[in-house]
Image (cartoon, rainbow, N blue to C red):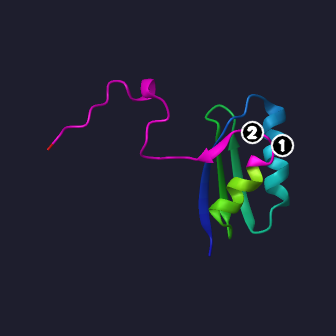
Amino acid sequence: MSQTVVLKVGMTCEGCVGAVQRVLGKMEGVESFNVDLKEQKVTVKGNVQPEVVLQKVSKTGKKTSFWEADAPAAPESKTGETVAAA
């Protein structure tokens, strides 16, 4: 079953991007992937298990975690946004 896994990966340069791309390129089940250095975001699509993708990318030595879509990445990124209490 094809699914999308989104990770936050601590990448600082194009060398980091290359390391992540090499690992993902060798992974079985990966159909496509996108590595965004500016956002420090890695999106992987394919017949893959999220935990396995996380472990493989972690082996590059980069700080890796699942991207939390609903949680603020950093407190300052949500300034000006308020949630109304019901």
Residue nearest the observer in this picture, 35 or 16: 16
Q: What segment carries the magenta color?
A: 58-85
Circle 1 Cα neighbour tier, 10 Å, few/some/many (<14 / 14–19 / ≥20) = some
Disc 2 residue type? Lys
Residue beneath disc 1: 19
Instruction: Kindly identify which residue carries mark 2.
Output: 62
Q: Image height check: is 23 above or below 80?
A: below
Quarter location, residue 60: top right
Residue 61 is covered by the magenta coloring: yes
Residue 64 in percent (x, y) is at 67, 44
Residue 28 located left or right of residue 48: right
Q: State the SS at label 2.
A: loop
The residue most toward the left is 86
As rendered, which of 53 and 14 lies closer to the eye? 53
| Residue at 80%, 48% in the rendered image | 59
| Rendered residue at 80%/67% (across/down) | 28
Q: Quadrant of the C terminus?
A: top left
Indicate the quadrant where residue 5 lies.
bottom right
Secondary structure under the numbered disc 1 in the rendered image: helix
Please state which of residues 10 and 13 is positioned toward the viewer in this rendering. Answer: 10
Residue 65, position as x, y percentages in the image: 62, 46
Q: Distance between the Cα atoms at labels 1 and 2?
A: 9 Å
Measured as percent of width and height from the top left, residue 29 is found at 75, 69
Q: Earlier in the sequence, mark 1 or mark 2?
A: 1
Q: Do the numbered discs 1 and 2 sit on residues whose CB atoms are within 8 Å?
A: yes
Verify whether residue 46 appears in magenta: no
Vertical order, 31 against 8 (above or below): below
Amino acid under disc 1: Ala
Mark whose residue sits in front, 1 or 2 = 2
